[in-house]
Amino acid sequence: MSRSWKEDSRKGWRRIRERVIARDQCCQACGQSEGAMHVDHILPKRLGGSDMMENLQLLCQNCNLRKGGRFFEHALT
């Protein structure tokens, strides 16, 4: 969770995370739908990205770890 989120806003982040999971339903890079899933910032916060739904995507653990803090315009295939 970003340092910009305050302790009392964890519930807000959980709600956003649940909405991203419900919207995407599978990894947006490889299509995997089982296993550990991460909510990823498409444009990393360190590069000016936000916590808005449009900047969030669901990635499996492997794709998210492979992406790291980089920005990709296209899928990681």
Image (cartoon, rainbow, N blue to C red):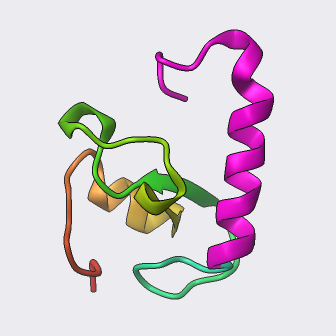
Q: Any magenta on residue 11?
A: yes
Report the label total.
0
Query: In the picture shown, does residue 12 fall above or below 72?
Result: above
The x and y percentages for residue 45 are 32, 36
What's drawn in magenta, residue-wise?
Answer: 1-24
Residue that sits furthest to the top in the current view: 7
The x and y percentages for residue 22 are 75, 71
User: Image check: 11 left or right of 56?
Assistant: right
Q: Main secondary structure of the magenta part?
A: helix
User: Image check: 57 left or right of 77?
Assistant: right
Q: Any magenta on residue 8?
A: yes
Q: Nearer the viewer, residue 25 or 66?
A: 25
Quadrant the N terminus occupies: top right
Query: In the picture shown, does residue 62 fall above or below 13?
Result: below
Quadrant the C terminus occupies: bottom left
Image point 73% across, 26% down: which residue?
Answer: 10
Query: In the picture shown, does residue 62 fall above or below 7?
Result: below
Image point 51% across, 60% down: which residue?
Answer: 61
Image point 44% across, 85% down: which residue?
Answer: 30
Q: Residue 75 lies in what quarter of the image?
A: bottom left
Q: Nearer the viewer, residue 27 or 19?
A: 19
Q: Nearer the viewer, residue 20 or 32?
A: 20
Q: Residue 9 lies in what quarter of the image?
A: top right
The x and y percentages for residue 52 are 49, 49
